[in-house]
Amino acid sequence: MSRSMRAVICDGFDGPGALRVGEMPESALSAGKVRVDIHAASVSFMDCVLVSGKYQMKPATPFVPGTDGAGIVKWARAWRASSRATVWCAATGPAPTPRPWARSKPG
């Protein structure tokens, strides 16, 4: 059964006003990956430039813009589920947390 996630989606490079909220399939998890239920995310200058098509790279569409957020660990091999985490993504991709770096917060 394919699972989906709610996300802000960029279908083309028409700027921040063209972003939409919708459903996307969850990406597959493999060793070394973490799934975080994002509770807060920022919109950076880089995100605005990227979705306007003016950044040095153009990911394949549709994609989920965003490079950082905070939330709760849902699944990980080396992390305790329900841990609070901050997430920074090295690159934007088809899911909010491609190649994430997560840091667990105590308590």
Image (tube, grey):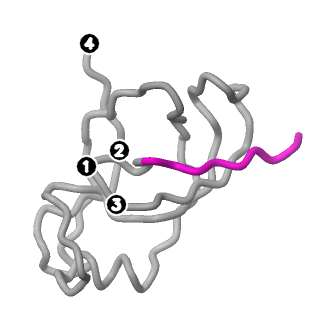
Image disc number at residue 22: 1
Whether pointer 2 and pointer 3 mark residues with C-beta atoms closer than 8 Å, the reply is no
Q: Nearer the viewer, mark 2 or mark 3?
A: 3
Q: Is residue 33 above or below residue 85?
A: above
Alpha-carbon span between mark 2 and mark 3: 16 Å
- Neighbour tally class for label 4: few under 14, some 14-19, many 20 plus, Cα within 10 Å: few
In the picture, the quarter occupied by the C terminus is: top right
Residue at x 29% of width, y 85% of height: 49
Q: Nearer the viewer, mark 4 or mark 1?
A: 4
Whether pointer 1 and pointer 3 mark residues with C-beta atoms closer than 8 Å, the reply is no
Alpha-carbon span between mark 3 and mark 4: 25 Å
Count the marks: how many?
4
Which callout, 1 or 2, points at the residue further toward the start of the chain? 2
Which callout, 2 or 4, points at the residue further toward the start of the chain? 4
Q: Position of residue 35 (x, y in %)?
A: 51, 35
The residue labelled by disc 2 is: 6
In the picture, the quarter occupied by the N terminus is: top left
Alpha-carbon span between mark 2 and mark 4: 17 Å
Alpha-carbon span between mark 1 and mark 3: 17 Å
Q: What amino acid is found at the position of numbered circle 2 in the picture? A: Arg
Image disc number at residue 73: none
Q: Position of residue 63 (x, y in %)?
A: 23, 56
Q: Is residue 35 above or below residue 70?
A: above
Q: Position of residue 16 (x, y in %)?
A: 26, 79
Image disc number at residue 92: 3
Name which quarter of the figure residue 24 lies in: top left
Which residues make up the magenta segment?
99-107
Alpha-carbon span between mark 4 and mark 1: 19 Å
Q: Position of residue 22 (x, y in %)?
A: 25, 49
Q: Is residue 70 magenta?
A: no
